[in-house]
Image (cartoon, grey):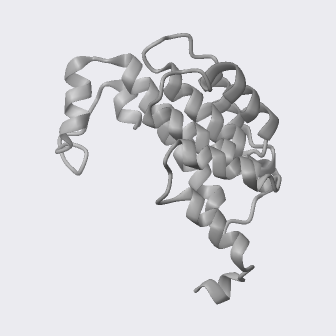
Amino acid sequence: MEYLSTGNVPDTGEIAGNTFVRFLMEQSDREAVNYLILAKKCEAAREKRADKWWYPTKEDMDNKDLTAILEEALGYNGKVFKLRYLLQAMRAAFTMQQYDLCLKLWDEQIKDLPESSVKNMCEEYIGGIDFRRDDYQTVILHYAIIMQTSGSIWWCDDMMAEKKSDINRI
C-alpha cells in the first residue's frame, strides 16, 4: 500500500495490473487511499496476532502498532469514511482486549447510525464481547438483529455445545 501514499504505482508486477489501484490513483482520492492504508495496517496487525504459531515479543505486548492504528482511526474528522474508521478503531481495540472502549464506541457513536453492512460488522464485535463475558442471551440478540445466521451465531453455538480441543476439531 506504500505506493498509494507516494502516488508511484509500479509499471510491472501484480499491482501494475490492479484496476482498483489504477482507479484510485487516477481519481487522486487521498481520503480513500488513507483509509485503505489504515485498514490494511490493521488487517496485518490483527492477522499476525491470530496466527497460532505467533509468539509475541516484549515489544509486541506493548501493542504499539495497534495503538497507533486506534489513535489514527479515532482522530479521523471527516464524514465520508467515519463509520469505516470507527470499524478500524473497534477492530484494533478488540484485538487489544479493550472491550470497554469497544462498548463505548458502540454506545456513543455507532449504535444509533442507520443500518449498514459496516455497522453490522461493528455489532459482531459487540456480540463477541458479550460472548466472552458469558452473556449468551445478549449475544443471540445482537446476531439475530444483524441477521448473522451464517457465521458468528453458529460459531458461538458450536463453542457452547461441546468444548472441543483444537485437535478434536481437526
Q: Position of residue 68 (x, y in %)?
A: 67, 31
Q: Is residue 45 above or below residue 157?
A: above
Q: Nearer the viewer, residue 27 or 150?
A: 150
Foreground residue among 105 and 155:
155
Q: Is residue 52 visible?
A: no
* Residue toward you, 153 or 67: 153
Rendered location of residue 105, percent (x, y): 69, 26
Q: Is residue 143 visible?
A: yes
Q: In what quadrant of the picture does the N terminus appear?
A: top left
Residue at 28% x, 29% y is 8
Q: How many marks?
A: 0
Q: Is residue 23 left or right of residue 150?
A: left
Left or right of 10, for residue 134:
right
Location of residue 4 in the rendering, given as x and y in whole percent from the top left corner: 35, 30
Left/right of residue 56 with respect to residue 145 in the rendered view? right
Give the camera-side residue of 76 and 168: 168
Which quadrant, please, contains the C terminus?
A: bottom right
Residue drawn at (20%, 42%) of the image: 16
Where's residue 129, x and y in %?
A: 74, 47
Q: Is residue 78 above or below residue 100?
A: above
Q: Quadrant of residue 28?
A: top left
Q: Quadrant of residue 117?
A: top left
Q: Residue at x 54, y 21 (%)?
A: 113
Residue in the picture at 53% in, 46% down: 43
